[in-house]
Image: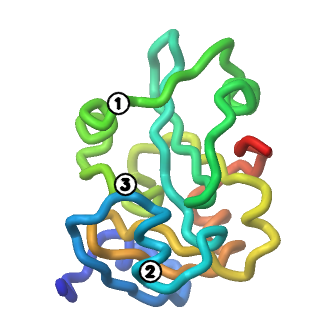
Amino acid sequence: MSTKKLNSMRLLEQSKISYEVIHYPDDQRDAEIIAEIIGAPPHMVYKTLVVQSIQGGKPYLMLIASDKRLDMKRAAVVAGEKKVQMATHKDAESLTGLLVGGISPLALTHKNWKVYLDQPATELEHLIVSGGQRGTQLRVPTLPLIQLTKAIVAELSED
């Protein structure tokens, strides 16, 4: 497994936020399967979804637990849009410069995209998010993650 320092790790270190690196086989990209592989509860492993307005413009990053589905109506409301759609894998990779399964809000802070975090995350002390590369997850304290990514906490997932 790669022990290469990623930009997301540098950002956390510059911000004096402790984190734990968790490696898994980099051929996996499904967050629920990754949660199982790394032995973490699915509600702690958060996936980053790239969502676009039907009108165009900057995409949004929506973080929800690996075992949840994004409620597109809620996503549109919190983003202040009439309608949003999930970016295709190809578009998500093109927009972010990262591979699906390795898309991370920590690796994209320089893009100044709005980040939304599903409300149940606030009940957790730590979240596990992508490090910005397939095969690398980071266990990060929730509140510092919210502050660093300027995440807006909202109800995003379907019941």
Residue type at mark 1 is Thr
* Image quarter of the N terminus: bottom left
Q: What scheme was used to colour the molecule?
A: rainbow
Label 2 SS: helix
Residue positioned 51% across, 13% down in the render: 54
Q: Position of residue 16 (x, y in %)?
A: 53, 86
Percent position of residue 74, x then y? 74, 31
Q: Which residue is mark 2?
A: 14
Mark 1–mark 2 contact, CB under 8 Å? Answer: no
Residue pictured at 37% horizontal, 54% vertical? 103
Above or below, 119 against 50 in this view is: below
* Separation of residues labelled 2 and 3 (CA atoms): 20 Å
The label shown at residue 9 is none
Residue behind mark 1? 88
**Which residue type carries mark 3?**
Ile
Height in image: 12 above or below 79? below
Q: Earlier in the sequence, mark 2 or mark 3?
A: 2
Is 38 placed above or below 87 here? below
Q: Is residue 144 left or right of residue 23?
A: right
Image location of residue 130, percent across then percent down: 41, 66
The Cα–Cα distance between marks 3 and 1, rounded to whole angstroms, is 13 Å
| Residue beneath disc 3 | 103
Is 24 situated left or right of 153 in this image? left
Question: Which label lies toward us, 3 or 1?
Answer: 1
Q: Which residue occupies 27% across, 73% down?
A: 135
The mark nearer the N terminus, 1 or 2, is: 2
